[in-house]
Amino acid sequence: MFNDKELICIQCAKSFIFRAGEQEFFSTKGLTNTPKRCENCRIFNRLYRAGKSTDVISKVTCEECRTEFVIPFRPLGYKPVYCNTCFRGRKTEEVRVTHFGVSV
């Protein structure tokens, strides 16, 4: 039903992928508009609107898929950091494991 779409960010003019999983999430929340900003620009914009400093933003690499992205905090280094796609996938797995009582 959902397919990956390539979009252009209105803030940085770089292309980004609006993944099928994200589209499904938007649909379940009742959101009809596609995102106008890439994930990194959305983080900057969110911090700016909240009146917070952008000094806390860190550029990191996802532990699972090795994609570079930014996060609105400084990681302490003792826990792995995942991109949104991998994090959602891991959360789904955790729910499935705990719900069905399956041990990994």
Image (cartoon, rainbow, N blue to C red):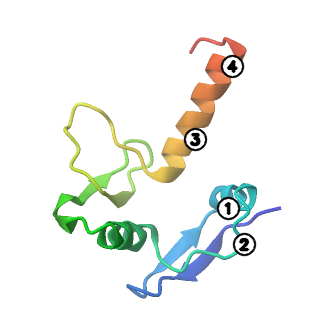
Mark with earlier residue (2, 1): 1
**Measured along the vertical axis of the image, is residue 49 above or below residue 14?**
above
Secondary element type, mark 1: helix
Q: Please name the residue that numbered disc 2 is placed on.
A: 32
In three-dimensional space, the C-alpha distance between marks 2 and 1, rounded to whole angstroms, equals 7 Å
Q: Position of residue 83 (x, y in %)?
A: 43, 51
Looking at this view, name the residue that lies furthest to the front: 51
Viewer-closest of 43 and 84: 43
Q: Please name the residue that numbered disc 4 is placed on.
A: 99
Secondary element type, mark 3: helix
In three-dimensional space, the C-alpha distance between marks 3 and 4, rounded to whole angstroms, equals 15 Å
Are the residues tagged 4 and 2 within 8 Å (C-beta)?
no
Q: Please name the residue that numbered disc 1 is placed on.
A: 26
**Residue at the image point whose x is 48% and y is 51% from the top:** 84
Mark with earlier residue (2, 3): 2
In three-dimensional space, the C-alpha distance between marks 3 and 1, rounded to whole angstroms, equals 16 Å
- Assign the C terminus to one quadrant of the image: top right
Q: Please name the residue that numbered disc 3 is placed on.
A: 89
Q: Is residue 8 left or right of residue 4?
A: left
